[in-house]
Image: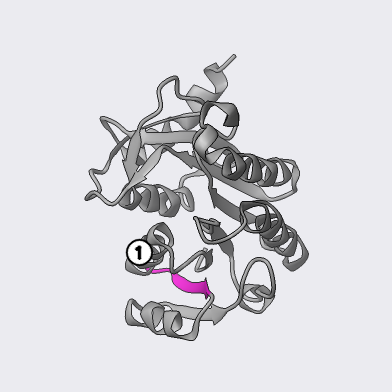
């Protein structure tokens, strides 16, 4: 894989993903909503396309090998529009364009949104998109991080299809997991929780297939 499209490229997690991709030798095309954000991407060695998951974005997909969706509604937008409908539109466009690899940054709690009533609408919207991705023909990875922080990345995590305890994780470590997922086959067609832990990220991701096969 040489060229990666990042949705949500100007977000706090998405921008870290963009920078890591560039550092690892990928050509990166980031989806941004405003012209000034394109300059921010160019400053780190990526290129930007103007668009929005709820409107137009297909122009940037025409020559890419993989997509990482780090878009999220946040507090300013409707989660149904962005986290559900917008993400599904991106999934469908990937199918149409023949882009097989899709990595989605979701959230812990999507399988039990009632456990987090303060963000329940966002979890429901993300879960609806997850289900479409899981049922699609795309080779997918769904990363469900715990509470996101702006702390320095540690490089150590805990990852499993379902973690018993919630936790936190730095955006930098989530970004590293997303980039590594492009080159670790064990992450393909996997959905997993991710929090700060004691295992090096690459080792944690490479062991997912064992944990998945052992799960009841």
Quadrant where the C terminus sits is top right
**Vertical placement of 59 versus 133: above or below?**
below
Taking the magenta stretch, the answer to whether it contains residue 31 is yes
184 or 215: nearer the eye?
215
Estimate the x, y position of residue 166 in percent, counting from the top left: 40, 27
In-image side of 39 versus 102 (left or right)? left
Instruction: Tell me the magenta residue range.
Output: 25-32
In-image side of 187 versus 102 (left or right)? left
Residue drawn at the location 68% of the way across and 75% of the way down: 56
Determine the secondary structure under disc 1. loop
**Vertical placement of 109 versus 44: above or below?**
above
Estimate the x, y position of residue 133 in percent, counting from the top left: 69, 46
Taking the magenta stretch, the answer to whether it contains residue 8 is no
**Vertical placement of 64 versus 88: above or below?**
below
Is the image coloured rainbow, by chain, by secondary structure, or in one colour? one colour
112 or 198: nearer the eye?
112
**Vertical placement of 105 versus 14: above or below?**
above
* Helix, strand or loop for the magenta stretch, by majority: strand
Residue drawn at the location 64% of the way across and 66% of the way down: 53
In-image side of 15 versus 135 (left or right)? left
Q: Residue furthest top?
A: 216
Residue drawn at the location 55% of the way across and 51% of the way down: 103
61 or 27: nearer the eye?
61
Q: Would you name the residue on which mark 1 appears?
A: 24
């Amino acid at each position: 894989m040489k060229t990666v499209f990042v949705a949500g490229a100007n977000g706090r997690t998405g921008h870290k993903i963009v920078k890591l991709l560039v550092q690892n030798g990928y050509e990166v095309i980031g989806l941004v909503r405003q012209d000034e954000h394109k300059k921010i991407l160019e400053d780190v060695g990526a290129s930007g396309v103007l668009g929005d998951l709820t409107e137009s974005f297909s122009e940037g997909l025409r020559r890419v090998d993989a997509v990482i969706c780090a878009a999220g509604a946040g507090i300013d937008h409707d989660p149904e529009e962005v986290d559900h409908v917008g993400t599904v539109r991106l999934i469908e466009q990937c199918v149409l364009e023949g882009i097989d690899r899709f990595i989605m940054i979701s959230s812990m709690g999507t399988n039990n949104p009632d456990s987090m009533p303060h963000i329940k609408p966002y979890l429901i919207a993300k879960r609806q998109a997850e289900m479409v991705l899981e049922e699609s023909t795309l080779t997918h990875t769904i990363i469900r991080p715990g509470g996101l922080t702006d702390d320095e990345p540690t490089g150590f995590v805990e990852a499993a299809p379902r973690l018993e305890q919630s936790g936190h994780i730095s955006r930098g470590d989530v970004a590293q997991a997303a980039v590594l997922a492009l080159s670790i086959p064990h992450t393909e067609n996997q959905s997993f929780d991710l929090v700060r832990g004691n295992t090096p990220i690459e080792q944690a991701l490479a062991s997912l297939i064992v944990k998945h096969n052992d799960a009841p």
